[in-house]
Structure formats: C-alpha cells, structure tokens
Image (spheres, rainbow, N blue to C red):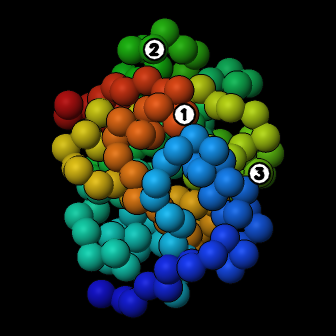
C-alpha cells in the first residue's frame, strides 16, 4: 500500500479540490479530502493506494443523455450497463462524454470528477451497490484526491437517485 498524505489544511489542496472541500463542509459532510502521492484515476489505482476493495471506490462517470450531461457514481467492482440504466430512468440513450465535455460539465478532469463542486448540479445516479460498503471513497476534484463518504451521503450531497447500474444486479 502506498503512503498517503492527508491534507492538514484546505490550503494544501489543489484549487479544484479546495472548491470541493468547501462544498463538502457547507453540506456538513465530515470526510476530509486526501491528496495521494500517485494517481487514483482508476478504481483499481485508488483501491490499491487506500488498501480497500475496488468496489468501495465510487467511480465518477459522465454521460450524455441527448445533450444533457449526467453523472453516474458507480462501484468500482463493475461497469455501467448504459442501455439498461437509460431504460430504467426513461432517459435518452447514454453516451460516454468526451474529456472536453466532462471538463465543461464538471470543471474537473476525467479521473478526478467529484460528486459535487460542478458549475451546475448534474442529474446523478448513485450505484446502489455502494451501499454494501460502510465507507466508500469518491474523487476530490483531481486525479490524485479522494475523500471518504458513504452511499447515503453521496445520494444526499448530489440529490441523486440510488439505483443498480450494472446489468448483473
């Protein structure tokens, strides 16, 4: 397991993570953003750095439903079944957003998209499989920052909907 550097103050964080930290604090979310020494861009990288199960990593994926960006927070243990999810929600087909579309919608880079801190709130789906873990980890606004949270906090902070997002569920 890699060692981690816990940001002892908000001033040590990258600018995008500072905004996420301010929003978390304003919502009463107790988790502190941690900057890791290496990339946590993928669920496997994040789980290895934290010493936790890959399924406890809340991967942030941005899709387009028509022209509207939507955020799906999925357990790192599986892939999103976009066709089934779009049908379940009554949305237009979900198409993976390109890096520039992700940045435009969230103000953050792929691999570091936090559940909040975007220019405008995005419709959000939180993978119900994340409820299997007492603690989950979500991106903190950059590919090297994470914070601890829970499934229920993710639903609350995003005003999201908890649904299964993988076809096997």
| Location of residue 138 in the rendering, given as x and y in whole percent from the top left corner | 46, 56
Give the number of the mark in front: 3 or 2.
Answer: 3
Residue at the spot x=59%, y=51% of the render?
A: 25
Going from N to C along the chain, the mark reached first, 3 or 1, is 3
Q: Which residue is mark 2?
A: 89
Judge the density around disc 2: few (<14), some (14-19), many (≥20) Cα neighbours within 10 Å. Answer: few
Q: Describe the element under mark 1 as helix, strand or loop.
A: helix
Instruction: Say which residue label 3 marks.
Output: 107
The answer to whether 122 is drawn above or below residue 74 in the figure is above
Read off the residue under disc 1: 158
Q: Is residue 37 above or below residue 73?
A: below
Q: Is residue 25 visible?
A: yes
Percent from the top left, x then y, of residue 158?
A: 54, 34
Task: Measure how far apart labels 3 and 1 are at the Cα level.
Answer: 16 Å
Residue at the top extreme, as displayed? 90
Confirm whether residue 83 shows in the render. Answer: no
- Above or below — where is 121 with respect to 118? above
From this view, report whether residue 1 is shown above or below residue 23.
Answer: below
Identity of the residue drawn at 55% across and 22% down: 93
Distance between the alpha carbons at the discs numbered 1 and 2: 17 Å
Q: Quadrant of residue 51?
A: bottom left
Circle 2 SS class? helix
Using residue 72 as the reference point, say whether residue 43 is left or right of it: left
Q: Residue at x 44, y 85 (%)?
A: 4
């Amino acid at each position: 397991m890699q060692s981690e550097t816990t940001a002892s103050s908000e001033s040590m964080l990258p600018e995008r993570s500072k905004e996420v930290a301010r929003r978390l604090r304003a919502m009463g979310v107790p988790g502190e953003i941690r900057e890791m020494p290496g990339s946590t861009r993928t669920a496997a990288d994040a789980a290895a750095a934290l010493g936790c199960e890959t399924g406890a990593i809340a991967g942030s994926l941005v899709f387009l439903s028509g022209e509207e960006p939507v955020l799906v927070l999925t357990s790192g243990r599986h892939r999103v079944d976009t066709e089934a999810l779009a049908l379940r929600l009554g949305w237009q087909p979900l198409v993976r957003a390109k890096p520039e579309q992700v940045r435009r919608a969230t103000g953050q880079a792929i691999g570091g998209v936090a559940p909040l801190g975007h220019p405008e709130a995005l419709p959000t789906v939180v993978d119900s499989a994340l409820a299997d873990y007492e603690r989950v980890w979500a991106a903190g606004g950059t590919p090297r920052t994470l914070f601890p949270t829970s499934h229920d906090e993710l639903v609350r902070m995003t005003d999201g909907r908890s649904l299964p997002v993988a076809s096997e569920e």
